[in-house]
Image (spheres, coloured by chain):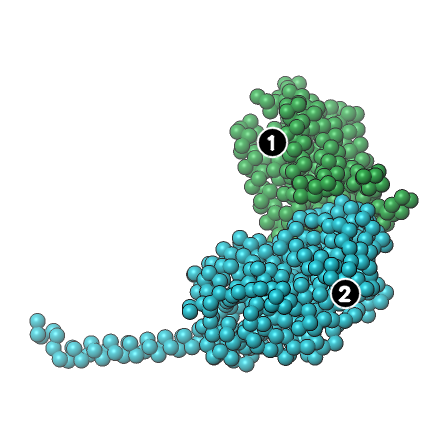
Chain colours: A cyan, B green
Amino acid sequence: MGKVFNKKFLRLTVGVISLSLLLSGILLTGALAQEPLRIGIISPASGNYADHGLMERLGMIMAADEFNAKGGVLGRKVKLVVEDSETDPSVASRKLRRLVEVEKIKFFLGGVSSSVAVAVGEVAQRYGVLFFATNQNSDTITGKYAHRCVFRVPPNMAMGLRAAGPYIIENVGKRWYFMTHDYEWGWSGTRWGRVVLKEQGGVEVGESLVPLGTRDFSSFLLKARAAKPDALVITVGGIDRASLMEQIYEFGIYRDMTIVHTLYDYEDIWAAGPEKNFGVHGIEWYHGIDAPGVKEFVERYKKRWPAALIPVPTQDTVNGYIGVRELLRAMERAGATKVASVIKALEGHTVYDSLRNGPTYIREWDHQFVCSFYIVRSKKPEEMRDRADFCEVIGYGLGKNIARTREENPVKLEPYPGE
Amino acid sequence: MNIGLVLPFLMNGVVLGLIFAVVALGFTLILGVMQVINFAHGALFAFGCYFAFTLQRIVGFWIALLIAPIIVGVIGLLLERLAIRRIYGGNPLFGLLLTFGIAMASEELIRMIWGKPGHSVPAPHFVAGPINLGFMYYSKYRLFLAGLSVVIILIVWLFLEKTPYGGVIKAGAVDSEMVTALGKNLPRLRTFVFGVGAALAGIAGVVAAPIWSVRPTVGTAILMPAFVIVVLGGIGSFWGSVIGGLLVGISTSIMVLFFPRASDIVPYMLMAVILIWRPRGLLGEKSILEE
């Protein structure tokens, strides 16, 4: 027995084992250091909001690339892991769960549809992972369904109607007919439309609830016309909106009343085309606004995506871009990728290069990015300076003036994850 | 509730009903002659929509209107020869499964070729925009569409009533086995009928595309109303499909006036009521399906 396990053999064995451990240790730390920082994107590539999903991803990729050009975040390259939400809350929740449980990703952005964001936000809170709702506008996401682990980048419908509503009352008229997309976001727009209408002494002459996936709006439009409103206040989005815009033109509705979209989305205007573009609208962001950094951003977009579906960045692109950028900046400020630390680094932070008029404030008590909201007028085809120039910017509401107060939005967020 | 309010809804209902009628006609012929519940009918409609979308931009509206249904008809012929004829005489469930599978595969194919997001299809220029009817503005295109659908239905009627082959199809729609006993080539008849049915679905797709816009799911949306119309109108019955289509179209449109959220269940409600009163549908006759 002693002959085999003699001193020389023992020394050799111990030497080999230690060397292997040392080498694995080096390799492992090397691997960890190079392991990319993976960020999950749950964004629609199909369904009603497919083109919105595409535009927001273009912005997100731009931000990730900018960070990677500087060496990444905390020494790690940023990698975006994309899943198709199919504009369906149950599909999105399932995909989020998979990315958390299997891929062990802790940071997410996306959503587009407010229903998807509500569902995904809830799942994120339960898992203690961070979710940035980049393109949803229902007030409930930073209201009734607000969570510690959820932040919302674009302005919400309350802000939108507060900014555009008074202008509409004064310049268009007091009799409003609502067209409400029959889901979370649509209800939110009409809800705040009613609040502003009451505050400004206007009158509601009717409402049509339009199911998601409606192809034929003629009946709803005919009903609206019969009520003789001054303004047709529309909160309908996605490809449904493009069909609605077509049919407003088809039935000559624009002749009888002013068309008002509470949240005009560039993707939908692009799909409908210049001949179907009528009215005065609220819009989150427009590539023609006169704000610092916007022209450069538009140029960078055009250079990066010369063959993109839409030749200019849309509000979804900017929100995707700012979402990823601020998330990564917060990680750098926190010096860590622990979810609770990143949340704390975001809360209360002011973004000065907001690509809007006025800074954007990341509010700590409801996690809303408090930023400006714009009012635009549809240009006639002959007024357009180029094929992307659909609107004229009339004005804007500054974030702090239009955001809900604490009394209006009594939100209580959960404790930080892991505490 | 005055007539000025209801009239445009009625007109919408008629337009909707006529499109439904054209789709249902194709469905009922296939069901009657071949006893196949063609769940791929919606997909054929979708192909019509998408071919219209692509072709209109290249060759204009009228040529697209001519070519697209022919292409869809040919697809129908191929489907029948390669797949559908294998399940004749067997368990009707096989036909259902097969055509359902074809429908799903077609939807995916559409996604692959034309992409996942939907597209809006502009109406042809000569009928775009509103028309002033004096007491109200209505859609030029929808009036045009109604006229076109009536012409299509008339052509189908003329074919079935006034041509000898049409007579054979009519007979086959009620009792296809008897048709063989009378010496007609049944397999060829079936292939032809499937092609015609597909072409009808295709042409309905072409004319409906501008008002419904195209998206990959447009086929599934038309399938159930078409099926319901065929059942409540009477399987294999020409006028059953036309009247059934108009009935469903008008009621759905009027329902939007009163209770929009319920408008989607109108076809089923109608079907239930009619079947209780007349179990074979409005104009149905005892058909081979009852055996």
**Where is residue A246 drawn, in percent x and y?**
77, 53
Q: Residue at x 76, y 62 (%)?
A: A200
**Where is residue A386 drawn, in percent x and y?**
79, 69
Q: Amino acid at mark 1?
A: Val
Q: Would residue A207 be found to the left or right of residue A143 on screen?
A: right
Contact between labelled residues 2 and 1, with CB atoms less than 8 Å apart: no
Element on which disc 1 rests: loop
Q: Is residue B83 visible?
A: no
* In front of the other: A32 or B271: B271
Element on which disc 2 rests: helix
Closer to the camera: disc 1 or disc 2? 2
Q: Residues within 10 Å of mark 1 (few under 14, many from 20)?
A: many
Placement of A154 over or under B97, stated as above or below: below
**Where is residue B76 drawn, in percent x and y?**
65, 39
Specify the quadrant of the image occupied by residue A57: bottom right
* In front of the other: A44 or A124: A124
Instruction: Check residue B36 in the rendering and tell me which mark sits there, or answer none.
Output: 1
Q: Would residue B90 be found to the left or right of residue A58 on screen?
A: left
**Where is residue B185 drawn, in percent x and y?**
65, 25
Instruction: Check residue A166 in the rendering and tell me which mark sits there, or answer none.
Output: 2
Q: In 3D space, how far apart are the residues under numbered discs 1 and 2 (Cα atoms)? A: 60 Å
Chain under callout 1: B
* In front of the other: B178 or A352: A352
Q: Residues within 10 Å of mark 2 (few under 14, many from 20)?
A: some
